[in-house]
Image: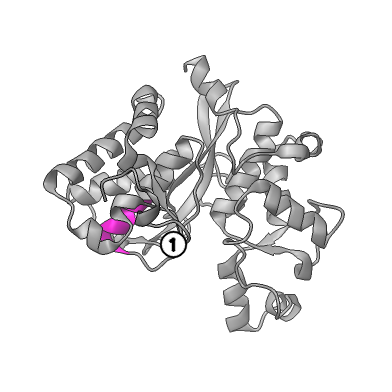
Amino acid sequence: MREEIIEFYKKISMYTNYSFYKNYFIGLPNDLKELTKLVNDNYIHRITLLKSYKREGKISKEYPWYRYRCEDDIFLTVPAIMGELFRLDARGLTHNRQIKDKLVITCRYASILLASILKAKGFSVRVRSGFAPYINEERYPDHWICEVWCADEKRWILVDADEIEIEGCSNIDIHREKFYFAAEAWLDVRHGKISVDKFLHGSHIHGLSMLARTLFFDFHSLMHDEVSYLFFPTYIDTEDEFDHLSIEELKRLDDLAILLLDVDKNFDELRYLFENDKNFRCMNTPLISDKDHLELEI
């Protein structure tokens, strides 16, 4: 492994920025199992909260009615997540946080928090987007995890910040065949190896368009831009735009996916694309649309 790649993923992004929490993070446990447990004890997944309502569980009875049922759109960065955790409970990350004081966030947010903690400790970490058959074997849900460089074994290990029980392995060293990376999903669907209906995204998007956007989630995350679920490439911001892509444009997405199959081998090419290709770099958000990207031919 090239040392510059390891060093690149030790750096923080605007999302994983530990800011003035660096020393606090350094003081947290170094053990990955303990860390994922600690992260999990401070938030509720929106699906867990929803299921609790349907089953009249303890979580829904204790979680305040006036709080948001999902806070993903509010706490986009680690400083925002940590600031709210400390506001609700001055102990910060604690195993004893009351349900009423937990955040309601999803896997992308748990992953950037874990990544930030580990980066503060000097680990090389990158956040990845894909699909997790170990959560649902019938339809693979979209999911975000971390890749952590294990210096002793000289390999990347897959770590699920959600502390999910996985058959046959630990959540801190997931077998690679158990996680469906976005690039693998895109190429397998494009080559007719699997139906696109096998993949499920938590938003309104579906089909090949959904896989394309998930591909960009992974690509941007690998380039220190761990965007949220509502950030889409400007040139395929709508499903209609995606449906009108040319054969050549779809082929370019195939080429991107092929590069993502081996991030370390193709690191320089991926960095070049991120720094120079406007279609691959520029994103629309809920508040930024085509008209804001004036320098692009849209």
Q: Nearer the viewer, residue 272 or 109?
A: 272
| Residue 210 on the magenta span | yes
- Left or right of 4? Residue 36 is right
The location of residue 4, given as percent across then percent down, is 51, 17
| Residue 151 higher or lower than 218, as above or below | above
Prevailing secondary structure of the magenta residues? helix
The part of the image, by quadrant, that contains residue 54 is: bottom right
Of residues 186 and 157, the one nearer the viewer is 186
Residue position for label 1: 136
Determine if the magenta segment contains residue 298.
Answer: no
Left or right side of 275 for 161: right
Where is residue 99? Give x, y as percent: 76, 68
Front residue of this view, candidates 75 and 198: 75
Amino acid identity at mark 1: Asn
Left or right: 89, with 123 as reference point:
right
Please tell me whether mark 1 sits on a helix, a strand or a loop: loop
Against 96, residue 280 (above or below) is above
Query: Where is residue 201 shown, x and y percent of the image?
Result: 40, 62
Q: Is residue 263 left or right of residue 60?
A: left
- At horizontal 50% and vertical 49% (from top left) the residue drawn is 144
Q: Which portion, as a residue range, is magenta?
A: 206-213
In the rendered image, the residue lying farthest to the right is 90
Residue 203 against residue 21 in the figure, above or below: below
